[in-house]
Amino acid sequence: MQLIRTILVLIAIYTAGGLILLEILFYSVLCKPFYRCWAITAANNECFNHLTFPTLEMAFDVSSIMLIMAIAGSIAYQAKLPFKRMSIVIGLLCMSAFTVVSAALKG
């Protein structure tokens, strides 16, 4: 149980670090200067059409969701539940798979 807790903390750090990294990249590297982010005609194309940012965001979203699903799947496998309850858990994990597909299609 301690191993799972440590892995969950590492996943949380990875997700928060990815969010912070994406925000820093977008506001200081990709869309520079910042005040042109809401301009109707921006000098920098990245500020206007946002092509790179959603791709990077999708990569972090999908990878963090897959890590969380791996933890949930391993816990469900170790639980040794009856078939009816295990099918409910598998259904919930399938909803997580839908989240991954949605994030991939969004990007």
Image (cartoon, rainbow, N blue to C red):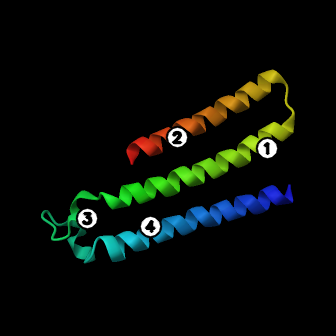
Q: Quick one: label 1 or label 2, which is nearer the N terminus?
A: 1
Q: Amino acid at mark 4?
A: Leu
- Nearest to viewer (mark 3 / mark 2): 3
Residue position marked by numbered label 4 in the rendering: 22
Residue at 21%, 72% in the rendered image: 36
Q: Residue furthest left?
A: 41
**Among numbered discs 3 and 2, the one appearing first in the sequence:** 3
Sequence-wise first label, 2 or 4: 4
At numbered mark 2, what does the secondary structure look like: helix, strand or loop?
helix
Query: Residue 1 at x, y = what percent?
Result: 86, 54
86 to the left or right of 58: right
Residue 50, x across and y down, in percent: 29, 59
Which numbered disc covers residue 46? Answer: 3
Q: Which mark is residue 99?
A: 2
Question: Is 89 placed left or right of 80 in the picture?
Answer: left
List the single residue furthest toward the top. Answer: 84
Label 4 crowding class (10 Å Cα cut-off): few <14, some 14-19, many 20+?
Answer: some
